[in-house]
Each structure stands twice: as structure tokens, then as C-alpha cells.
Image: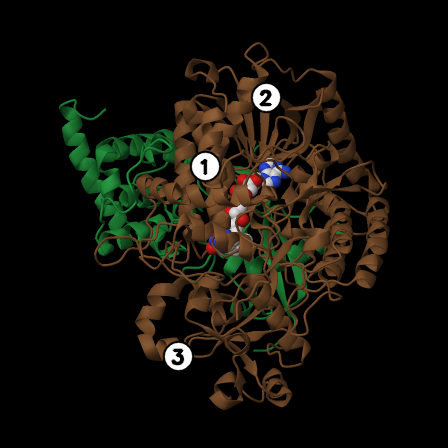
């Protein structure tokens, strides 16, 4: 591994706010260590800009460990960039050749309006969870944790789905701006578990209705979402959600669900 | 300063039960008349906000991220403790209590710790009912693993993502309440002041991080669930935004700050790669269940490894020093964190460290892979191995991981009584933000437990007691128009304009980095009077440099991350000094706090129970005025003082 500093040309989306049009602006960075993360490189660029009295580039991030779902950059057209199953904050510069030109844009999707530069508003995801992404239990007064045995394979698949970090890369990658991968991951986790059965039908109906209200497009099985998902959430969960939705809608025709 | 801990009377196992019974209740129909502010949406804040909303209070919840789901609790990997004794290996509420008091090196409050152990079991029940997918055995029942500082397996986990799953459970309960209208959520809002009127907390002032609007919020009580302050070291395992601001504002308004120097340096983090580093990444302590920690026995081998002339796999067994197993045969690689971290530092100070900087030791899975097979190790820690490879480019199935200690968790925090109330009536602190239950050292998998205990099972009772005591006449009547609110608003606005007007030459980040360096040297793994004294002199100079020479670009009326950073760094620059003062005044060693002057010949921390079996509680007396150190004596009626031994 070479430890020499590398240089890059960064083509970054700058936009003052939601109502002002934005554009790509070129910046040069030099002396970047291959062991630095992508966001550390942006930190350094911001240090340079601020030292020159120019406004720093706004980008969301927090944990920098690939788990909070806050970082949200589209790099060379791919949400979270070129490395599979990796969030931007976990992407390291050793993956980019010295001298490369790198385009950095926000996660683009109509339901994710731009706040500033590379920062978008993903609050629609919270409202989808509000609609049905929970099991209605009160604090206290629940059975012993081992009262219901859950087969290991069921628990494991529920955990696969639950690994979603709510970053929104799936939406940004989809031509239709569909949020089915995100929504189905939560629905699939809860609908598989015995604890989630009571609200299974309501859950899918309410979550999907909220999806429509927020303006997310429908899923036409491109599969781009699965390709960019940093947590490896698979299309199976969408298939499960479609099945659960069909059953729930059928029951609902007879007025039994909502 | 009134430090009445309000510990209920009675035998240790009866205190909480009695207290719950004797605490006043708010009638269900009256709860909606009270407004409660919850700052923070991590495990402590989300569980508190959801539960209080469900009980019927009007709850306002704030966080600085764009969604409550992103609080830094999400990053906890290893697990959560509970005294379920599902393994039938001798665990009990009393043993968890005992381990926690001992692990904290006799600097925590017995009654609080016992309550924590009691409610630990309810937490697991609650999470399972919410759909948290904990790891299970083939029979379908819950699996456990063991963690540092315990000889039983009482840690519940969800792969290497336990914090994420627990937080998403609490988040979904919170979102449900938001949907039902009992909780109003304000994301991208940063609390910048606590408002105190007639000696009581009556609300907060926030800055809307998108529009820049500075706004007042009135309530009958304020709950600070704002997490820890490890970022005072600049490099830590905390998230970029983690800060001391909320707690420090409360301190400046009269809340006592307890044991600020008690910071946990976690033994298993990925070593620093260089100057461009912005944060350090933790490798879960659970890895110590199967990984063995070692450095070469000889300095020559270590030097050859650092120079890239040898690889760890070239070092034969006989030339490896498995120093934890050697020094602590009964706990081995699972020795508590403070002890493990110091042992790593000792090995590296002895020039036997690896990593290109010399500050690294090995965590080796070769034996576990030979014993259990790679698939089993993948199942247990797959995501951690992947993360390690992403960051370092090294495949840890083939070559041992390199690790080094890093600041991680802060046992210190706002002083609270048994009801979790700070010294300001009406202002409560929950989760990592309070000083509470871990004494001078927290055991692994106990922070998640404490956050959820505080939020789900303690505050719903104790807050009711406070509100019932206020009476109904004043419920919901605090006005955001009052002079106290006006003064706070003015203060926050002035401070913001000040940051923007200095237009100097230093970036907030560079000043933070400099502070971090001072803190790591003076108040890190080993502390010494002369070094602390120098830091106490140096920090005010750095603070002065900040206020003269910082530069913050952009304006206050928009999203401005540089401005946010400047505010946090300004508070760290004051708080760092307080930490050093606390470390200097505590002229003993205990748990995480190793004063070089006080150690046994083998390097163990030498406590001074005569002089220091107390909580140090700092009282603000004005800017650039030396704060006053008060004490709350600690008494141990159940677990008797002993030298911690993990040999
Ligand atoms: C990498 C890592 C791994 C860990 N692993 C474990 C583990 O395996 N087991 C274990 O028990 N513990 C673990 N811990 C410790 C544990 O995760 C934390 O102590 C705990 O989650 C803290 O929860 P909290 O609710 O107190 O704070 P946090 O989860 O940090 O939440 C703080 C909240 O406060 C808000 N906030 C902060 N400041 C402000 C402000 N000024 N204005 C508005 N909002 C504000 C934030 O937005 C956030 O919502 C780990 C910690 C780290 C860093
Ligand atoms: S910053 Fe948290 S996932 Fe990237």
C-alpha cells in the first residue's frame, strides 16, 4: 500500500437552498492519504475552502461507521459510490486512482427535496414508519422474552431485513424513485415474527398508502435498489410485501382490515 | 449545592419497589395537561419520549440529526446485559448488581445500580415484544454471549448490530406515538440553552439547523438525553455531531456536573491511520470472546513488523506475549476495559506495539477459526470483519486484526439523584448524559441497558412524582414569552453572531484537533499532576485563540455546519478544562482514572477509599472563575470495598 498523497478533481453539486438552482463546481484536492475515508477527503477540502473564506460544502454524516444512514452522496452516478455494500462514510480513497475526476451529487429523488448542496430531506421515511412500521405494544406488561420460541431461520431473515439503515440509496438508484426496498424491509421484518402477526394486514396497507402519499413511484423490478443497498437488503422482501399486500387488500375488500 | 441523592430507605432489594409505591402519581386524565421536553432520541430519549407519550403527556422531542433513528446509540455493536439467567450459569439480579459495582471500582451509587439490575429483565421482554430480532439458538430461544468483567453469559445481541436493533425498536415505538399525536418530533434542531425560572427548568432554546431560526420552547420538565462527550478528545468512536453542549448549558445554568474526568478508553478500536483521520472506529468487545490479544515478546520482532519486514503470521507461538492471558488468567482476554486498555498502552510504551505508528496490538482469531471453523466465526462477527477490511484493507480471517484503545464512553455526566433529576428542579438527565450507574468504569453491554432502563422503566415513575408535586394549577402554563426565555434567546443569538463576526484565520476543526491532542495527553489513559496542571494552563490560551481567531463562513440563517461545529468546539474548550481539573483533584486512581502517582507495583489502580469514596460534583461559578468541587459521599452497605482483582 503506497502512502503517498493522491490528488483528485472533484466535481461537486452546489446549491444554496431548495429554491435556488444548483450546479456542478470543480475543486482540486491534493495530498490525500489512501487510508483516508471519502468524507475525510471532503473534510480536508472544506478546511481549505474555509481557510480561503469560501463557504464549506454541506453534506450529511454522523456515525461514520456505516450504520446511522445519514451520509448520502451519489458518487459518479452511483448512490454511496462504487464499492458494493459500503456507505460513503466507509468508502476509502485507496479505491480511487490518483488523478481521478470524481463527481459528487446528492441522493436525487422527488420525495427527497434538496436542503442545501449535498443535503436532502428524507423525512418521508419517518412518516412511512409512522404509518405502520411498528408493533403496537405498551411499555411494560409484555410476556417473558422466551415465552415465544422463534425458529432461528425466521429470526435470521427478520434480522437480514432489520439491517436496513434508512439511508435512501434505494430510492436514489431507482428510475421510479420507488421506496419499496426500504418499506418492505421493515414490513418483512415485522410480518415474519410471531409478535407482528396481529397487525400484519393493517401494516402493509397503511405503509403502502403512505408511500403513495409521499410521491414515491411504484416498483417495476429494475433491481437497482438491491444493487446499491449498503446493507445487502434483497428483493425477496419486496416479493413478500407484495404477497402480504395482496392478501390484505383482498381481506380489506370485505371490510375486515382498516 | 444540594446533593441529596434521595435514596429510598429499606433493604437494597426493596428500595425501588417501595419508592414506586410511595411516589405520587399523576391521574391519567391530567397527564395531557403537562408538557415534557425530551432532548435526544437515542435509546434514553426515544424510550422516554415514547413511553411518556403513551402515558398521555404532551411530549416534544428534539434531535440534531435528520431523523430520530440516527442517534449514536445506533452504532453500539456488542450487546445488552440482563440478569435473565437463561443460561443457568449462576446469574441473578444480585450478581449483575455486584459485578457492576465492582466493575465501577466502587465509585457508583449502590441503590441506582441495584435498580438497574432489577429492571434489566423487563428491557429484554420489552424489546422482544417490539420485534427486535435478537440472536436465537436452534430451539428458538434467545442466545447469549459473555462480555468483559463478568463470568456469566448475560449479554443479549443482534449480530454485531445490537444498538441499531434496540434503537430501531425504540424509534418505532416513538414514531407510533408521533403518528398518534402524543409526541411532536423536531429533527435538525439543536438545543443551545436551558431556560431556568425561579430555580426550575421551564424549557429550552433551540436553533433550527435548516432555517437558522432560534426558538423558545416551554414545558413543565426538561429531560436531557443527549449522550456522551468523548468527542472532547476530537478522535473518538463517537459520531461527528456528538457534543457536550446540552449538558454544558445545563451546568452553566446551575446543574452540578459529576465526575467529568471519568471517560472510558475502549481497548478494541482500529488504530489511527494518520493526521487526516476524523474519527476512530470501534471493533466490538464481543470479539474478545474468540480473539486472543498479543504483541511480540521482543522489541526486535515488533520493530521488524512495523518496518514491514515481518508479518504477524511469521511470529511463532513461543515468541508471542498473550499479555492479558498472562496477567489475568481467570478473565484473560475478557478483562475489564480499563485494565485491557492500560495493558495495551504498557505494551506499546514498552516498544512492542505494532501498526505503522507503533500504537497497535493484535487481536488474533487463528485459534478460534481452527477450533470452530471460519463459517462459525463469520456468523458471529461477519459484519465486523467486513468493516475492518473496508477500513484497513486487511482480511482478518487471514491476518490478525490490529487494535488500539480509543475514547469511547463517558461515565461522567450531569449529577442526578435517585429520580434522575439534576440539581436544577425539573431538569432530568438520562442515558449517557447523566453520571449515574457505572462509577469509574462501565462494563461492556451495560450502557444500552442503562439508557433503556432510564427511559422505559425509571423516568415514567419518577417524572410523575415531580409533576404531581408541582400541582395542576401551573401545568402547561410556563410561557415562552417570559423574561427568562427572552434572556436565553438573546444570549443564543448573540453567541451565533459573535462566531460569524470574528472572521479570523483558524477553522473550528483545527482548534478542536488541538484541544483533542491536549486532552489525550493529559486526560487520556494515564494522568499525572504535572501534565494536568500544564493542560489547565494551556486550554484557556487555546480558548482565547478561538474567540480571537476562529473563522466561520456562511450565515446564521441557513444550514451551516461550520457554525454548528464552532458552537460545539467552543463548549468543549471550556469543558476540557473542567475535566482536567476533576482529574487533578481526584488524587487517587480508580477504574478508568489512572493517576500515575497512585498505582500498585504491577500497575493496578490504587484507590483511596478514605479520601475519595465520593462523587465529585462541579458547580459553575462564572466564566473564567474556578468552579467549586462539591461531593456526594458514597456508602457501600452490600458490596464491600475490595481491591478489584481479575487475576
Ligand atoms: C461505537 C460504540 C459502540 C458501543 N457499543 C456498546 C455496546 O455494545 N453495548 C453497550 O451497552 N453500549 C455500547 N456503547 C455505548 C452506548 O451505545 C451509548 O452509551 C448509548 O447508546 C447512549 O445512548 P443515549 O441515548 O444516552 O445517547 P445517544 O444515542 O448518543 O443519543 C443522543 C441524542 O441526543 C441528541 N442530541 C445531542 N446533543 C443535542 C443537542 N445539543 N440538541 C439536540 N439534540 C441533541 C442527538 O441527536 C441524539 O438523538 C457503544 C458506544 C459506541 C460509541
Ligand atoms: S455517516 Fe452514518 S452511515 Fe455514513
Query: Pointer 3 indicates a residue of which chain?
Result: B
The image quadrant that residue B396 belongs to is: bottom left
Query: Which mark is on residue B134?
Result: none
Along the line of sight, the residue nearer the viewer: B244 or B311: B244
Going 66% across and 62% down the picture, which residue do you hit? A29
Name the spot of residue A221 as percent of width and height, x first. Answer: 27, 48
Q: Earlier in the sequence, mark 2 or mark 3?
A: 2
- Can residue A177 be seen by looking at this rendering? no
Q: Earlier in the sequence, mark 3 or mark 1?
A: 1
Along the line of sight, the residue nearer the viewer: B493 or B421: B421
Label 2, secondary structure: give it.
Answer: loop
Spatial distance from mark 2 to mark 1, Cα to Cα?
33 Å
In the displayed structure, would residue A69 be above or below residue A198?
Answer: below
Spatial distance from mark 2 to mark 3, Cα to Cα?
57 Å
Note whether ligand 1 is within 8 Å of mark 1: no
Q: Are marks 2 and 1 on the same chain?
A: yes
Q: Could you tell whether B86 is left or right of A80 in the image?
A: left
Query: Pointer 2 indicates a residue of which chain?
Result: B
Q: Could you tell whether A247 is left or right of B410 in the image?
A: left
Rendered brown, the chain in question is B
In the displayed structure, would residue A121 be above or below residue B316?
Answer: above
In the displayed structure, would residue B277 be above or below residue B362?
Answer: above
Query: Which mark is on residue B14?
Result: 1
Query: Which mark is on residue B219?
Result: 2
Along the line of sight, the residue nearer the viewer: B250 or B644: B644
Rendered green, the chain in question is A
Query: Pointer 1 indicates a residue of which chain?
Result: B
The residue indicated by pointer 3 is B367
Along the line of sight, the residue nearer the viewer: B171 or B473: B473
Q: Are marks 3 and 1 on the same chain?
A: yes
Name the spot of residue B245 as percent of width and height, x first. Answer: 68, 40
Amino acid at each position: 500500500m503506497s502512502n503517498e498523497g493522491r490528488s483528485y478533481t472533484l466535481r461537486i453539486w452546489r446549491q444554496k437552498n431548495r429554491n435556488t438552482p444548483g450546479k456542478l463546481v470543480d475543486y482540486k484536492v491534493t495530498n490525500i492519504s489512501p487510508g483516508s475515508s471519502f468524507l475525510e477527503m471532503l473534510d480536508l477540502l472544506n478546511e481549505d475552502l474555509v481557510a480561503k473564506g469560501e463557504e464549506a460544502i454541506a453534506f450529511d454524516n454522523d456515525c461514520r461507521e456505516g450504520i446511522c444512514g445519514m451520509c448520502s452522496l451519489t458518487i459518479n452516478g452511483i448512490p454511496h459510490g462504487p464499492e458494493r455494500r459500503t456507505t460513503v462514510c466507509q468508502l476509502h480513497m485507496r479505491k480511487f486512482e490518483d488523478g481521478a475526476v470524481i463527481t459528487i451529487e446528492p441522493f436525487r429523488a422527488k420525495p427527497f427535496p434538496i436542503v442545501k448542496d449535498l443535503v436532502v430531506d428524507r423525512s418521508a421515511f419517518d412518516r412511512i414508519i409512522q404509518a405502520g412500521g411498528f408493533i403496537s405494544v405498551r411499555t411494560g406488561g409484555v410476556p417473558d422474552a422466551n415465552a415465544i420460541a422463534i425458529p432461528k431461520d425466521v429470526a435470521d431473515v427478520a434480522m437480514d431485513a432489520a439491517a436496513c439503515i434508512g439511508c435512501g440509496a434505494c430510492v436514489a438508484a431507482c428510475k421510479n424513485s420507488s421506496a419499496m426496498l426500504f418499506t418492505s424491509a421493515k414490513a418483512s421484518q415485522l410480518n415474519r415474527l410471531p409478535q407482528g402477526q396481529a397487525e400484519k394486514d393493517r401494516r402493509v396497507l397503511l405503509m403502502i398508502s403512505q408511500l403513495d402519499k409521499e410521491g414515491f413511484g411504484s416498483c417495476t423490478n429494475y433491481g437497482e435498489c438491491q444493487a446499491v443497498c449498503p446493507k445487502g437488503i434483497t428483493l425477496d422482501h419486496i416479493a413478500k410485501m407484495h404477497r402480504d399486500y395482496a392478501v390484505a387488500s383482498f381481506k380489506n375488500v370485505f371490510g375486515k382490515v382498516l | 449545592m444540594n446533593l441529596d441523592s434521595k435514596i429510598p430507605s429499606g433493604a437494597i432489594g426493596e428500595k425501588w419497589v417501595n419508592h414506586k409505591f410511595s411516589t405520587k402519581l399523576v391521574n391519567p386524565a391530567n397527564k395531557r395537561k403537562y408538557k415534557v421536553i425530551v432532548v435526544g432520541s437515542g435509546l434514553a430519549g426515544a424510550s422516554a419520549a415514547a413511553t411518556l407519550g403513551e402515558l398521555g403527556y404532551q411530549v416534544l422531542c428534539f434531535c440534531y440529526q435528520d431523523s430520530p433513528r440516527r442517534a449514536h446509540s445506533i452504532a453500539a455493536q456488542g450487546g445488552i446485559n440482563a440478569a435473565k439467567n437463561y443460561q443457568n450459569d449462576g446469574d441473578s439480579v444480585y450478581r449483575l448488581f455486584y459485578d457492576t459495582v465492582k466493575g465501577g471500582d466502587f465509585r457508583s451509587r449502590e441503590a441506582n445500580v441495584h435498580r438497574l439490575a432489577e429492571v434489566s429483565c423487563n428491557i429484554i421482554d420489552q424489546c422482544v415484544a417490539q420485534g427486535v430480532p435478537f440472536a436465537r439458538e436452534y430451539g428458538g430461544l434467545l442466545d447469549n454471549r459473555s462480555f468483559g468483567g463478568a463470568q456469566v453469559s448475560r449479554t443479549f445481541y443482534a449480530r454485531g448490530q445490537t444498538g441499531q436493533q434496540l434503537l430501531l425498536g425504540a424509534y418505532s415505538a416513538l414514531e407510533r406515538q408521533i403518528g398518534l399525536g402524543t409526541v411532536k418530533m423536531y429533527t435538525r434542531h439543536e438545543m443551545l440553552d436551558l431556560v431556568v425560572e425561579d430555580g426550575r427548568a421551564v424549557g429550552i432554546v433551540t436553533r433550527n439547523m435548516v432555517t437558522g431560526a432560534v426558538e423558545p420552547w416551554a414545558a413543565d420538565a426538561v429531560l436531557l438525553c443527549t449522550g456522551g462527550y468523548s468527542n472532547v478528545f476530537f478522535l473518538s468512536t463517537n459520531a461527528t455531531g456528538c457534543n457536550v453542549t446540552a449538558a454544558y448549558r445545563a451546568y452553566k445554568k446551575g446543574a452540578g456536573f459529576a465526575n467529568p474526568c471519568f471517560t472510558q478508553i475502549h481497548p478494541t478500536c482500529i488504530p489511527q491511520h494518520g493526521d487526516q483521520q476524523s474519527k476512530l472506529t470501534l471493533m466490538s468487545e464481543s470479539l474478545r470472546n474468540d480473539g486472543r490479544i498479543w504483541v511480540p515478546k521482543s522489541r526486535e520482532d515488533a520493530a521488524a513488523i512495523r518496518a514491514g519486514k515481518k508479518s504477524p503470521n511469521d511470529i511463532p507461538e513461543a515468541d508471542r506475549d498473550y499479555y492479558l492471558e498472562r496477567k489475568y488468567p481467570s478473565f484473560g482476554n475478557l478483562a475489564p476495559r480499563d485494565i485491557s486498555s492500560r495493558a495495551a498502552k504498557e505494551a506499546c510504551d514498552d516498544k512492542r506495539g505494532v501498526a505503522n505508528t507503533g500504537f497497535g496490538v493484535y487481536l488474533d482469531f487463528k485459534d478460534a477459526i481452527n477450533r470452530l471453523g471460519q463459517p462459525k466465526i463469520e456468523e458471529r462477527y461477519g459484519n465486523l470483519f467486513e468493516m475492518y477490511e473496508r477500513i484497513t484493507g486487511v482480511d482478518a480471517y487471514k491476518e490478525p486484526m490490529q487494535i488500539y484503545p480509543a475514547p469511547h464512553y463517558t461515565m461522567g455526566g450531569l449529577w442526578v439523584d435517585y429520580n434522575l433529576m439534576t440539581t436544577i428542579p425539573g431538569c432530568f438527565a438520562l442515558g449517557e448524559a447523566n453520571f449515574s450507574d457505572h462509577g469509574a468504569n462501565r462494563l461492556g453491554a451495560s450502557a444500552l441497558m442503562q439508557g433503556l432502563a432510564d427511559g422505559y422503566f425509571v423516568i415514567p415513575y419518577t417524572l410523575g412524582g415531580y409533576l404531581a408535586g408541582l400541582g395542576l394549577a401551573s401545568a402547561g402554563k410556563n410561557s415562552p414569552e417570559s423574561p427568562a426565555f427572552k434572556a436565553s434567546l438573546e444570549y443564543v443569538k448573540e453567541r451565533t453572531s459573535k462566531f460569524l463576526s470574528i472572521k479570523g484565520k483558524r477553522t473550528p476543526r483545527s482548534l478542536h484537533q488541538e484541544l483533542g491532542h491536549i486532552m489525550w495527553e493529559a486526560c487520556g489513559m494515564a494522568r499525572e499532576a504535572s501534565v494536568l496542571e500544564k493542560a489547565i494552563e494551556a486550554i484557556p490560551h487555546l480558548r482565547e485563540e478561538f474567540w480571537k481567531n476562529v473563522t466561520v463562513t456562511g450565515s446564521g440563517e441557513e444550514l451551516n455546519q461550520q457554525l454548528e461545529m464552532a458552537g460545539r468546539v467552543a463548549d468543549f474548550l471550556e469543558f476540557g478544562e473542567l475535566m482536567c481539573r476533576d482529574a487533578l483533584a481526584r488524587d487517587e486512581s480508580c477504574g478508568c482514572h489512572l493517576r500515575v502517582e497512585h498505582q500498585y507495583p504491577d500497575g493496578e489502580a490504587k484507590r483511596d477509599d478514605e479520601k475519595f469514596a465520593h462523587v465529585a460534583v462541579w458547580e459553575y461559578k462564572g466564566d473564567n472563575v474556578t468552579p467549586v468541587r462539591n461531593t456526594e459521599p458514597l456508602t457501600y452497605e452490600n458490596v464491600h470495598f475490595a481491591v478489584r482483582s481479575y487475576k
